[in-house]
Amino acid sequence: GKKSATEKFKELDADGNGYLRGLEMRELAAWVHSSGFDTPKGRQLTGGIPLGKQIMERLDANGDGRLQFSEFKAWFVNNFNNEKLN
């Protein structure tokens, strides 16, 4: 079934600290890529690390180098609300 932003974030937040960073961002990138979601800049950055970095740079509103749930949710809802994602 379709996961909510909350469920997906909890799944990605492996250490449960309420932020995505480092390896967790690579997991997010891998999931985004496997979902067939194109980044706005196109598909040239498809590897886990570059795509994760690209996502982080776009979504990290306060620039602290980690993704908090509010930042993740705004993006998730904007991009995935009408998508069938696992």
Image (spheres, rainbow, N blue to C red):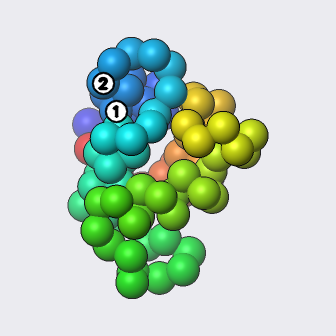
Q: Position of residue 75 (x, y in %)?
A: 60, 48
Q: Is residue 33 visible?
A: yes
Q: Amino acid at mark 2?
A: Ala
- Picture quadrant where residue 11 is located: top left
Location of mark 1 (residue) = 12
- Picture quadrant where residue 64 is located: top right
Q: Position of residue 23 (x, y in %)?
A: 31, 41
| Residue with the most extreme top position | 16
Q: Is residue 47 above or below residue 78?
A: below
Q: Could you tell me which quadrant the N terminus lies in?
A: top left
Give me the C-alpha separation between circle 2 and circle 1: 6 Å
* Viewer-nearest residue: 81 or 15: 15
Q: Is residue 61 above or below residue 29?
A: above
Residue sitting at x 35%, y 38% = 24
* Viewer-nearest residue: 36 or 62: 62
Q: Position of residue 3 (x, y in %)?
A: 36, 34
Q: Secondary structure at mark 1?
A: helix
Q: Amino acid at mark 1?
A: Leu
Residue sitting at x 37%, y 26% = 13
Q: Residues within 10 Å of mark 2 (few under 14, many from 20)?
A: some
Q: Are marks 2 and 1 in contact (CB under 8 Å)?
A: yes
Q: Which mark is residue 80?
A: none
* Viewer-nearest residue: 77 or 60: 60
Q: Secondary structure at mark 2?
A: loop
Residue sitting at x 53%, y 46% = 76
Q: Which mark is residue 14?
A: 2
Q: Position of residue 9 (x, y in %)?
A: 43, 30
Q: Is residue 82 visible?
A: no
* Viewer-nearest residue: 77 or 43: 43
Residue sitting at x 56%, y 75% = 40
